[in-house]
Amino acid sequence: MANFKEVNKENSIFLYEQIKLGIRDMIEREEIKKGDRLPIEKELCDQFNASRITVRRAVKELESEGIIEVIHGKGTFVKGLRRPIHILDLKGFTEGLSSSENHFTKEVIRKEIITADEFLMEKFNRDSPFEVVKLVRVIKDDHDVFSVDFAYLPYDVYPNILPKIEDNVSTFRIIHDDYGVKFKNAKKDIEVSLPTMEISKLFDISNSDPVIKVNKVINDNNDIPVHYSEYYLLGSRVSFYIDVDVEDE
């Protein structure tokens, strides 16, 4: 059984925060691993020398952050910490995740050739309709849906790409290796929105649960848009970070 530390009641940090941070710390150090069951509420009270109300609040906040999962009739289990995502990364979504344990699966839900509407024509800076490959995928993390991805690729830039797109295959690698397209820059817009019926169904969440939506346009070396995507994330599962090098004047 994990060795939980007793809370310090003279500490300026609220007791429930101490319990919450203590459990997170043990998860980060893998003293409690993903899939492990936490002790029952009474045991947590005894181990932290805290009241049921305090322990209950700490557990509730960890659950709302997606770190633990309460399964009625079975107990409380470690679900995992937020995965950090680099905002400026030009690589593919899963390749850009900052984690030592990128155990992801990519499942293609739909792939088809469509005619670009006015929205896509604007994103790709084109004046007339053109054929676009529409790709819908779910990215799963240990069997949970981690992200829902809608990608759009101009068919005249990537002819005959459909057969190459399969489960667990990086489209970015196909773009680079098979078509020789190099990325120069990207523009990302990040917003919080309510999911559509399709998104809520794929995530298995309510349509009143907010999701993080990332819109991304990538340009090639000639500053021509060659990739547009919209992907959705659960706020409880991710955190965003940025690294910027500053040169001394």
Image (cartoon, grey):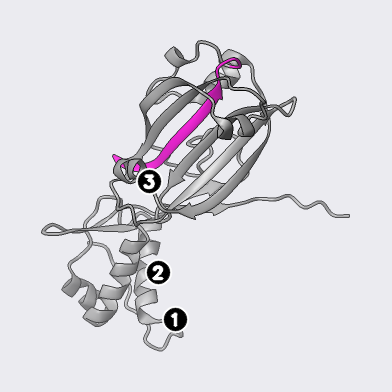
Front-most of 57 and 112? 112
The amino acid on which the numbered mark 3 sits, given as a three-letter code, is Thr
Q: Which residues are magenta?
A: 143-157
Secondary structure, mark 1, is: loop
Q: Tell me where residue 61 sits by quadrant.
A: bottom left
Residue 153 part of the magenta-drawn span = yes
Quickly name the residue at label 1: 13
Q: Nearer the viewer, mark 1 or mark 3?
A: 3
- Residue furthest to the left in view is 73
Q: Tell me where residue 46 sits by quadrant.
A: bottom left
Q: Is there CB contact under 8 Å for labels 2 and 3? A: no
The amino acid on which the numbered mark 1 sits, given as a three-letter code, is Ile
The amino acid on which the numbered mark 2 sits, given as a three-letter code, is Leu
Quickly name the residue at label 2: 21
Q: Is there CB contact under 8 Å for labels 2 and 1? A: yes
Quickly name the residue at label 3: 196
Name the residue: 49% across, 31% down: 151
**Label 2, residues with CA under 10 Å away: few <14, some 14-19, many ≥20:** some
Name the residue: 46% across, 34% down: 150
Q: Is residue 169 visible?
A: yes
| Label 2 or label 1, whichever comes before in sequence order | 1
| Label 1 or label 3, whichever comes before in sequence order | 1
Secondary structure, mark 2, is: helix
Front-most of 118 and 110? 118
**Label 3, residues with CA under 10 Å away: few <14, some 14-19, many ≥20:** few
Q: Position of residue 11 (x, y in %)?
A: 43, 85
Q: Position of residue 139 (x, y in %)?
A: 39, 36
Name the image quarter holding the N terminus.
bottom left
Left or right of residue 119: residue 8: left
